Amino acid sequence: MNENKMAVMPVRRLLLNMSWPMMLSMLIQGLYNLVDSMFVAQLSEDSFVALSLVYPV
C-alpha cells in the first residue's frame, strides 16, 4: 500500500527530501542570471545597467 510520506516521515528527513529540488532550481537560475549578466556587460555598459534594473521585476 502507498502511504502518504508527509504523514509518516520524520520532519528533518522530509525537509531535506523536499527542499533539494528547490535549492537546485534556485542555483541553476542564479547561474543563468550570472552568465546572462556577463554576456550583456560585454555588449555595453548601458545595456548592463538596464538589465540590472529589470532583474528584480
Image (tube, grey):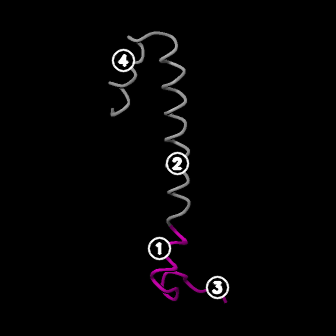
Q: Earlier in the sequence, mark 4 or mark 2?
A: 2
Q: Which residue is mark 4?
A: 50
Q: Position of residue 7 (x, y in %)?
A: 48, 86
Q: Report, in whole angstroms, how far the alpha carbon at label 1 lies from the one at label 2.
A: 18 Å
The three-letter code of the residue at mark 1 reads Leu
Quarter the C terminus occupies: top left
Which structural element holds mark 4? helix
Task: Give whichever of 57, 30 is nearer the camera.
Answer: 30
Which structural element holds mark 2? helix
Q: Earlier in the sequence, mark 3 or mark 2?
A: 3
Q: Which residue is mark 3?
A: 2
Q: Earlier in the sequence, mark 4 or mark 3?
A: 3
Where residue 27 is drawn, which disc sits there? Answer: 2
Q: Earlier in the sequence, mark 1 or mark 3?
A: 3
**CB atoms of marks 1 and 2 within 8 Å:** no
**CB atoms of marks 1 and 4 within 8 Å:** no
**Which residue corresponds to the image point at 54% horizontal and 39% vertical from the top-left?**
31
Q: Report, in whole angstroms, how far the alpha carbon at label 1 lies from the one at label 4.
A: 38 Å
Q: Which residue is mark 1?
A: 15
**Vertical placement of 33 versus 20: above or below?**
above
Mark 4 closeness class: few <14, some 14–19, many ≥20 residues within 10 Å: few
**Vertical placement of 47 versus 28: above or below?**
above
Give the label, 1 or 2, closer to the camera.
2
- Magenta segment boundaries in residue numbering: 1-18
Q: Report, in whole angstroms, how far the alpha carbon at label 4 lies from the one at label 2.
A: 23 Å
